[in-house]
Amino acid sequence: MRHHLVLRVVTKLLIPFILLFALYVQFHGDFGPGGGFQAGVIFASAFVLYALIYGVDKTLQVVPEDVLRVGIGLGVLIYGMTGIVPLFLGVPYLDYSPLAHSAPHGQENGIFSVEFGVGITVSSVMAMIFLQFASRGGKDDEDANGGGDET
């Protein structure tokens, strides 16, 4: 893919805008369409675009699989802890009221935190799924194409 200069330049121009749009969808999710799931998928699409143009090996240098694994766990942890913290504060599970000085602000903080956790998890899982399928080359592909050097 070294000779596709136009694709590389366009990708370098597009990825920042894709990531910026993902952040917009993430933070605008409280007030309109969007939220953590949609933002996570958009964020992962930038990762997939980079991998398609520059290759899986180069992508893994930018974002190693360990970072994606941590993202999966961290997102679930943020989501779960947002619901558990109110339990320790003496209110029902997922009642975000005590998370700020007033109940409406607490609800906003709780929803924001949950959506943030969902966004991290979804983007990490989508990127990991893509990586698992993209790195599945090698011997399996040769066997499917007739065994390689037999002519």
Image: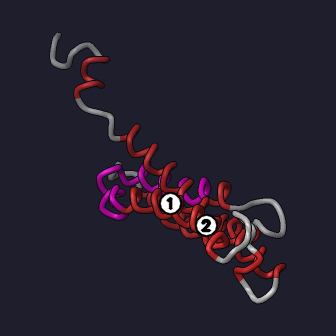
Which of 141/6 is in front?
141
Which of 49/87 is in front?
87
- Residue 129 image label: none
Sequence-wise, the earlier of marks 1 and 2 is 1
- Circle 2: element type: helix
Q: How is the image coloured?
A: secondary structure
Question: Which residue is at 53% across, 62% downward?
Answer: 75
Kind of residue indicated by mark 1: Thr
Above or below 50: residue 23? below
- Circle 1: element type: helix
Extent of the magenta region: 40-66
Q: Is residue 30 magenta?
A: no
Q: Specify the quadrant that holds the C terminus.
A: top left
- Residue 11 image label: 1
Quarter residue 150 falls in: top left
Kind of residue indicated by mark 2: Ile
Question: Which residue is at 71% across, 77% downward?
Answer: 109
Q: Position of residue 39 (x, y in %)?
A: 64, 60
Which of 71/104 is in front?
104
Q: Which residue position is annotated with label 2? A: 84
